[in-house]
Image: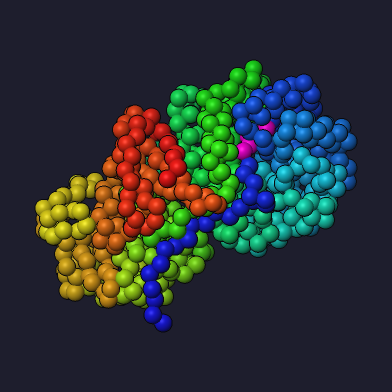
Amino acid sequence: MRQSLGPVPRPKAPLPDNELWFGANFWSRLGGPLMWRHFDDAIVSAELAVLAANGVTLTRSFMYWPDFQPEPFRLDEACLHRFGRFLDLHLEHGMTTLPTMIVGHMSGENWDPVWRAGRDLYRDVWMVDRQAWYLRSVAQRFAAHPAVAGWLVSNEMPNYGGGGGIWGQDAGGVAAAEVYAWGDLMAQALRAGGATQPISLGDGAWGIDTTGVDNGYHLRDLIDFEDFAGPHTYPMGDDPVRQNLNAAFVAELCAMGKPVVMEEFGLTSDFADQDNAAHYYRQTLYTTALAGAVGWIGWNNTDFDLPGQDPYRHHPFEQHFGLTTVDGTPKRALEEFALFRAFADRAGLATMTRTPSHTAILISSFLDQPYPFVNQGDRSVIRDIGHQAYVSAKLADLAPAVIREADGLPTPRLIIVPATKALLATTLPALEAAAAAGTTVYYSYFGGEWPNQRGSWLAGFDALFGVRRIMRYGLAEPPASEVLTWRFLQPLGDLAESDELTVKVAGTADGRGVALVEAREADVVAVDQTGRPAVLVRPVGKGRIVLVTAPLEYYEARLPHVNPAPSARLYQALGQVAGVAGLAGTDTLDAFAEVMAGANGQMTGFVVSESPEPRAVTAWFAASPGGEPQAVDLELDAYGVVSLSI
């Protein structure tokens, strides 16, 4: 079958009625997880009023499980009454909430109902039945309340029930089938109790699909009965741009046909000053919106002054994640939330759609498929490399789509396969067929971060890239130097003959290895300082296959403060070679521009600065791909965002 080029859709699945959720995770400052023992109408009402005044109209609320189900066959009527009053207060302030049911984990500690007695939350039939009864009973009580916007089964269940979370705890042998059965039964219990609102697990989307770590949580399967994906993101990094775009990349990885809600994100004032906290909130809000998210629930509504109460006694920084101080004073982060909400209402963000992309970043199925005898290090590094490639493609104004190998291969103008050790044998003919149809296929060599069958697993490597490898089995061929200088022998896009790219080497001894090749059917476009081929291009049909002989994006992913990185400059040139006609761009690699389309055909342009200092940026926008671009000069604040009608 003859293939033809076409852009790749970039998903943005809507919530019911095209609603957007603007929210905050909520614990009253009077008690944190113990708020239901110390519930105070006046204080809770005041806390909700501050949120509502700043554009926050939804909370994620928490039923502390030891209090709400003190015995296996009994719910606590006092807690249920207070929760009912809590719902009524939401209505008084024009707000709704997402009740979170099995709250055994919170802020660095796990709590059990005393009657659990060590029973397994997934496998013990009686224990699963008691959880289901609890969810069904609460839903029967509150499902019809107009303040309930949706339901969450748990809070970060991998940390509580087993499977481990973002800190990489032992998975405890939790199997995907067990997690699926448990989650499905919990969702059925809520539905049996009369819940008609959207349901999700509240697990944080920390499973194999977003981390490469198989903890039993497979979003691709769980989304069968989840009505939205709810990632929790608290990145610890060493590069400001990767940090700013972390949540956006996670949102892209969670896009599996259902809405993506940023269920938890935020930061503690103990780790960052208010100005930088505002930058982080602004970047997270806008970049995840551009990545297709339709809900934002910051962690959390208020600071606490509870130094003697667990978990704050031993995790004291957990007291200061609030959007407000203990006395209710808004922090800069809440001001950014209010500004974002005002923009969303004014511009009609709810009905905007993402424009399709002529650039796709291919994520190997070795990230999210539990193939046997694959080194865990070589699985999880795929996520880090993909993240860096995503950052560089954004800075190159390519507005990339993120595609998964397991979903098949489209034929956009440019496919980026960044520093990839392994692809399925069936993918390689598909890449060559895409090139024959006119796609520019880019691949950078990577032998893996660990020595498990070190080397590219791409069978037919030489034929695919038009080279002959000159390599020895089992050895990582070291790069020529700790700093590589690639000199171009012929033009590549706007990279002219004699232009140079400087590439710093980083990573493990295994991961640093390069491919030593000589050209056969490929043209050597760039060489390193020793004259070894660095960039080669093999013409294929209407397109081409580009080989970079060093793991460029891997090096960058292992370097601090690297962005804008050399790969962004290379991707920019490849976009020109591929004929990627975008709708927006800038004159700099430390800002990027994108476009979203409104329901009435109105286009909205976004310019996002990744500069830590205020700067002038010239951006351009076109009404259609290949259309006449219109330039606009802008003054952007540090890490600033500007939106404008086109």
Q: Is residue 534 left or right of residue 211?
A: left
| Magenta stretch contains residue 25 | yes
Q: Residue at x 23, y 72 (%)?
A: 539
| Magenta stretch contains residue 35 | no
Residue 108 can be seen in this image: no
**Where 567 falls versus 24 (above or below)?**
below
The structure's colour scheme is rainbow
Q: Is residue 426 left or right of residue 255?
A: left
Residue 81, horizontal then vertical, whole percent: 86, 33
Residue 114, horizontal then vertical, whole percent: 79, 39
Residue 268, horizontal then vertical, whole percent: 53, 28
Residue 520 can be seen in this image: yes
Q: Residue at x 16, y 64 (%)?
A: 524
Q: Is residue 134 left or right of residue 483?
A: right
The magenta segment: 22-26
Displayed quadrant of residue 405: bottom left
Give the residue furthest to the top: 327
| Residue nearest the viewer, comparing 183 with 168 | 183
Q: Is most of the magenta stretch helix, strand or loop?
A: strand
Quarter of the image where the C terminus is located: top left
Q: Residue at x 63, y 37 (%)?
A: 23
| Residue nearest the viewer, comparing 546 with 177 | 546
**Where 183 falls versus 85 (above or below)?**
below
Q: Residue at x 22, y 57 (%)?
A: 493
Residue 148, horizontal then vertical, whole percent: 76, 42
Number of marks in the image? 0
Quarter of the image where the N terminus is located: bottom left
Give the residue furthest to the bottom: 1
